Every structure is written in structure tokens, then in C-alpha cells.
Image (cartoon, helix red, strand yellow):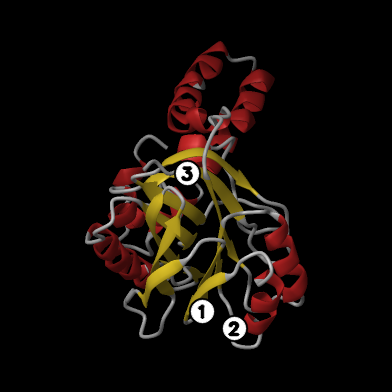
Amino acid sequence: MLCHAAVPNTVGNLGSLLETFLPWVGLAVPVLLVCALLRRSATALAALLVPAVVWLNLFGGLIADKSVTGGNLTVVTHNVNAGNPDPAATAKDVAAAGADVVALEELTGQALPVYEHGLAAAYPYRAVEGTVALWSKYPLHDTAPVDIRLGWVRALRTTVTTPHGDVAVYVAHMPSVRVQLHGGFTADQRDASAAALGRAISAEPLPRVVLLGDLNGTMNDRSLAPLTAQMRSAQGAAGDGFGFSWPAAFPMARIDQIMVKGVVPTRSRVLPDTGSDHLPVAATLRVEG
């Protein structure tokens, strides 16, 4: 845990794989505690303080509820799953969250009209580019696709004109990562897309920026450094717990992210299961004029 950054990515991207599930390494501590108690070893018990302290140093800050009152813009992002058997029910659940802005990823041509119909009453404005889209209660303009080096569109940028000022909102769905027998943890394409998106956000002229999407990586993953170096995690700043979002049946990692700069997160949370293989995540932000 302490030296995770030293684990190389040269062989099967093992470093990124470790960082994706890094909090779970702490499960070794209670297992070793049981062994130490069975052996009645005071030395082993004392030695366990080292990994326990390291884990608390890395993740202890995530355990406490860091939410505060206030906020004037609520956003949601959700990978709805291209194979979702009931997109109408998912759209209803998403609308029920009452967010001001909703980003959806992994939209198919067949399901898109279902989501448009299900969200139209609550969200009069929308932007669609490729397989990602944004619905908003506030006007949108300057919408354009963002090239994340895939050869097809899985990211967009738009301006949301809120009552408190314009906010540049990016929606992105990074390429999936795979664990393969001979290739290990294959994340090269995702990493290239993260770098391209990082360059686009770095060049963003508006001072208020929000990134919503399935980034297929956690905030600990070094490969998302082009993004994490310039933006804050809403969950890290104003969440309660780890906020794991994937897989929905037994969440083990937060790969669905809400990241910001120029605005202040006041609350971050995971929303209930909608029938997708991901859980939706939400954040309330304070946009200051």
C-alpha cells in the first residue's frame, strides 16, 4: 500500500490494477490479526500497526462524512449499460434523483429515444454526441464532441448556463480495461484517452469546469494523472465513504467520477441501483458568481 506507485506498469499494467483496488488490500490486516491472536504473538500484533496506520493514512479521510450545507447545482452521471434490458425504468430512476444536470454514458441508438422520452419532461435541454449525452434544466450552448483518440465519439463538451454563471461540462466514457490471460491488465487505450481528455480540459477557457463520466479508473490510478492533477474528486472532497460504483451487484471500485475545478463540492453520494451494471453517482456543487 505504501509503495503502490513503485509497482511498474511495464508488465500487464500491474501498477494500475493494484491502484484500482488499493483500498481492498487493507483486508489483509484483519486476516493477519486473527493469525496473530491465534499464535498469541505480541510481536505480530505490534507489527500489524504498520499496515493499519498506512491504510488509515491513505483512506481514513474517506471514511468520515465530509458533506456540508449549501450548493446550487446538482449533477448526476450514470453508465446506463448498452445491454440494459429496461432503459425506460432506468430513465425514470435517473429523473427521480432530481438533479439539475444528468450525464449518461454507453447509450445505444435503440435506447437513446427511450431516454429522451423519459427525461424530456424534467430536462428541456439536451446534448448528444456519439454514445454520451447530457440533459439539463438550464440552457446549453457550444456543444461539441471531444476527441479522446478512439476513432468514434465517446466524449463531449458543452456550456451549461446556470443562474450563477456558465459552467463547462465534459462528459466522457473512457475505453474499458480488461484483465487478459496473456496481456494482464490492458489499459493502454484508456490511458491514451485520459491524456487526450486532460489536454482538452487544460485548454478549457472557462474557469468553472465539471467532468462527468465513466473513466474506467479510480482516483488512485496513476494513469488518470492528466485529470487528477488538475481537478478535484467530488467524492474525495465532500463524500461519505468510498463511494464505490462498480459493479452494481457488489461495488468494489469507484470508476464513475465527478471531478471539478473552479466550483466547490458540498455533497457527493452514490444513488440506488437502476438496473445497469454501474451505480449512478451524484454531487451537489456550489457555483459562485
Q: Position of residue 60 (x, y in %)?
A: 50, 28
Badge 2: few (under 14), some or many (20 or more) residues near its Cα, within 10 Å? Answer: some
Relative height, residue 154 to residue 93 (above, below): below
Residue 46 in picture, x, y percent from top left: 50, 14
Which image quadrant: the C terminus?
top left
Kind of residue at disc 1: Thr
- Secondary structure state at the residue bearing disc 3: helix
What amino acid is at disc 3?
Answer: Ala
Q: Label for residue 131?
A: 1
Measured Cα–Cα span from mark 1 to mark 3: 24 Å
In the picture of the structure, the residue carrying the numbered disc 2 is 108
Tell me residue 204's x, y (percent): 26, 60
Which of these two is toward me, 35 or 5? Answer: 5
The mark nearer the N terminus, 1 or 3, is 1
Residue located 62% across and 24% down the image: 33
Q: Which secondary structure lies at badge 1?
A: loop
Question: What residue appears at the point 53 percent right and 72 percent down from the top-left corner?
Answer: 126
- Going from N to C along the chain, the mark reached first, 2 or 3, is 2
Classify 119 as above or below 35.
below
Residue 45: % across, % down: 55, 17
Under circle 2, the secondary element is loop
> Which residue is drawn at the image coordinates 53% and 19% (left, top)?
44
Observer able to see residue 270? yes
Kindly identify which numbered label has been placed on residue 234: 3
Q: Does residue 173 show up?
A: no
Residue 90 falls in which quadrant of the image?
Answer: bottom right
- Asked if marks 1 and 3 touch (Cβ < 8 Å), the reply is no
Instruction: Judge left or right: residue 176 versus residue 4.
Output: right
